[in-house]
Amino acid sequence: MRSLRFLLALLLCCPLVASAAERPTLAATRAVGALRIDGALDDSAWAAAPAVTEFVLTGAREGQAPGESTIVKVLYDDTRVVFGIWCSARRPMRASLTPRDQITDGDHIAMHLDTDGDAQRAYIFGVNPYGVQLDGIITDDVDFKWDGVWEAEAQRGADAWTAEIAVPFRTMRLPQQPARPWRLWVRRESTPWNEVSSWPLYVESQAGNLMLQAADLTGLEAVRGRRDLTLEPYVFGGVLGTRSFDGLGAASSWDNSTSDDAGVDLQTTLTSSLALNATVNPDFSQLEADKLQIGANRRFPLSYPEKRPFFLEGGEVFQTPLNLVYSRRMSEPDWGLKLTGRVGGLRTGALVVRDAGGASLAGVGAGPWSISQRGTWALGRGTLPYGDGQGIGVLFAGHAQEAEEGSIDRDGANNGIFAVDAKGRFSDHWSYESQLAHTESQHDVEDGNGGMRRESLRGGVGVLRINHSSRRLDLGFGYRHIDPGYRNDIGFEERVGVDYRRVNWQIHLRPKTGPLQRVSWTQYNMVIHDRTGRLDFMEITPGIEMAFRKNQFVWTGMQFYREHWLSRDYDSPRFHIFYENSVWRAVSFEGDFDWGRGIDYDSSRSVWQESYDLSATVRPTSWITVESNTKHLILANEYGDQPYLDLWLVGAKTTAQFTRHLFVRVYPQYDSGSRHVVLNALAGYVLHPGSVLYVGVNSGWDEVQNREQLTSRQVFAKASYRFQL
């Protein structure tokens, strides 16, 4: 650990700045007269605006001319920036009337807008030929869970489609005194051609954030952010009925209960680039079901993505190289405060939540994995960019729990973490990221004599990753150390007291002709040792990856595992294949399958294991989408034997999107393990993010005396409205 700490400290203290090439430029033009946002591009102001037409392909045919032409212009007025878009469509368009943000598997175009000009973070505003909106935030990763209030309209013609995107300045966090021009990168996807084109050219092999390769958007130097106040109240009400069955299959009477809730979120800008959110009894009702996951025969607990608006807004601020923040630990907040934005050159975020508890603490690291009690969570993060696309950051978090009511635990528990991280580039092709963290925890445990004693834990974690990217070769090296006493209540960590070492590479061949766009030899190697030096886990995975010109992708390879489990080593070779096909817009699908040896963690023995994960999307019309997912897990003593575990999870979500605002969704799911069927039906009207009306029905069936019987039923309604003052 000492050598890792020394190297990380060296990287933290020695900024490494790669040279920046001169960037292309596009000037935003001030609009004269009124602008109608109708997607037609017929306002006179568009005629005088400079145009970008030099779109080129990214990916396997990098730098070549695309099959379709694209034109983008930029206007602005006192309150907003407006993008005008013209896209040729010589082949039939592949697009649908879908829910917001769900357009990435069809034709669409997206503006990536970095208002700070430092290549650290950018907003995404996209649209498809039906005018369906896409928005999100891009940092090191792309996150489409952020939703802003802005306008988009589109019109479809015989051989082209046009669109207008109007983004109010108040929707974005703007610097008070811009030190740099805004940055703009435009990406268009044309699925009939299986092409992605961009302006400027995006070189995949260049290290660092995508926005390092963006153009300068000039003409907006005089734009200043404005103070803003948003109020978003909500109300929720529902009726839930449950019943049980006796051993003879006779049903009890329905036990009905009602629930109602109300709360309010308030957001105000302290400065044009710094926002304060306050929430009382926040709206954490989750209308969208979590993705199906198999929980059987798992060594480590499941984790689920965040879907609640309060945590999604500004959530990218708390991202770090290590997975230190898993916000679903905060399960039942009474109130919360959140500060996100920028103070001078420092990007900052802070969060305080008073929580009623009830979340699982499985996967927090060392110490007891239990259920959280009532308490307070605190989280803070600051990042200081330097150079071009580089930065250093700090993070701290704390969790103070009250003692469980009625227990002999007197003082509850507390946990804290402090971390420092850095990312940067050695050159255009070499990059690194690193992080060091230290945690301290205290909790009461039984002393064996009917009393309690205070127990303390402390530990650290460190990670260093170095990556190389080029046209022919990608390389990755990683090392991570986790002390035995490491515990982070707000994070997620599978193992403690171990060292991870990783080496992986991809060697690419890009045929100029034929059905293949790219063929790659992939190799992933990882070993994990415990603190005694004993091998805990090893993976060696060679494979072949093929990308076809006609919207097909396949990866196949062997996975060689060695895992130490309960005093024994298990060798588990498996064959793995992943296949994706979107040749036809009406039907697209992907499958992820593996077969081979595995471990039955309950009985501690080597078994034959098969797993299948098949997803398909069917679009019988432009406004109906059916998304199905099937997961199948088989465990048998040996290959060809009768399975002793044969588990199915099946779900099919059907959405009828009548307009961009009005939809009806039906989502049945079946779990063969519990023999449980659930049906969720939801009708919704979404005026814009934060202003919604939902009415839903949830029903559950369980098998009783070899028959499916209705055991639960719920009717609910929820409404909220976002007032911008």
Image (tube, helix red, strand yellow):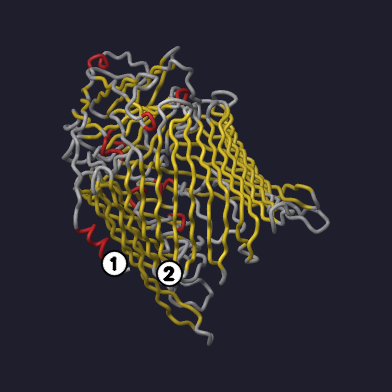
What amino acid type should be assigned to the residue bearing mark 1? Ser
Can residue 248 be spotted in the picture? yes
Residue for badge 2:
497
Describe the element under mark 1 as helix, strand or loop: helix
Q: Is residue 631 above or below residue 131?
A: below
Quarter where residue 179 is shown: top left
Image spot of residue 219 (x, y percent): 18, 28
Image spot of residue 632 (x, y percent): 64, 47
Task: Please tell me whether mark 2 or mark 1 is closer to you in this view.
Answer: 1
Q: Quadrant of the N terminus?
A: bottom left
Quarter where residue 508 is shown: top left
Q: Earlier in the sequence, mark 2 or mark 1?
A: 1
Q: Quadrant of the C terminus?
A: top left
Q: Nearer the viewer, residue 316 or 312?
A: 316
Describe the element under mark 2 as helix, strand or loop: loop
Q: Residue at x 54, y 74 (%)?
A: 406
What amino acid type should be assigned to the residue bearing mark 2? Gly
